[in-house]
Image (tube, helix red, strand yellow):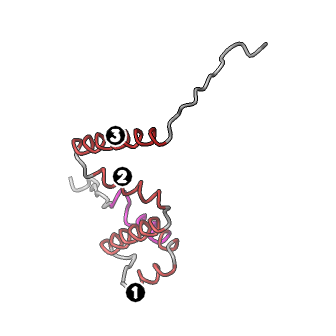
Amino acid sequence: MDNMPKTTSKKLYKGMSYRKLQRWNKEHRSLLEKKYQIWLKQNSYQNIGWDRVIKLHEKILDLKRETEIHNMSLEELFLESDRIGEKYQTSQEKKDFQERFQHIIESISIVAEKIFPDDEVEFVDFGDLSK
């Protein structure tokens, strides 16, 4: 029985081995703005040792998210905040919001119709165009 090969389970983090995680950290750290690279070094984020490699990985992800948020347009920020907010709403809260929203839209439509009535009648002729 001693001659049987031992099965070793490789330690993974988010599906990456230690070496793969180190490579990912190295590549993505170099893509960060210089000020973030300096900050990581000053705050002792290192790419050696399993726990430190994981902490560096998480911090790089945070910095990338922060950079992405700063580069988003106002519309993208609203959409992102809506997406995040929806994760924490129950289905009943979502339904209640949709009902209130629909009521507001209908109210706006009624007011707009009073201000800008569409009195003009439009005719569309779908007759034979080959004549």
Q: CA distance from mark 1 to mark 2?
A: 34 Å
Q: Nearer the viewer, residue 73 or 112?
A: 112
**Callout 3: few (<14), some (14-19), or many (20+) C-alpha neighbours within 10 Å?**
few
Kind of residue indicated by mark 2: Arg
Kind of residue indicated by mark 1: Gln
Give the mark nearer the N terminus: 3 vs 2. Answer: 2
Q: Nearer the viewer, residue 35 or 104?
A: 104
Cβ atoms under marks 1 and 3 closer than 8 Å = no
Q: Is residue 85 left or right of residue 130?
A: left
Q: Which residues are magenta?
A: 13-27
Q: Which residue in the structure is indicated by mark 1? A: 42
Q: Is residue 120 magenta?
A: no
Q: Which residue in the structure is indicated by mark 3? A: 102
Q: Quadrant of the C terminus?
A: top right
Kind of residue indicated by mark 3: Gln
Q: Which residue in the structure is indicated by mark 2? A: 83
Q: Which mark is residue 75?
A: none
Position in image of residue 76 (x %, y %)? 46, 57
Q: In the image, is residue 6 above or below residue 19? A: above
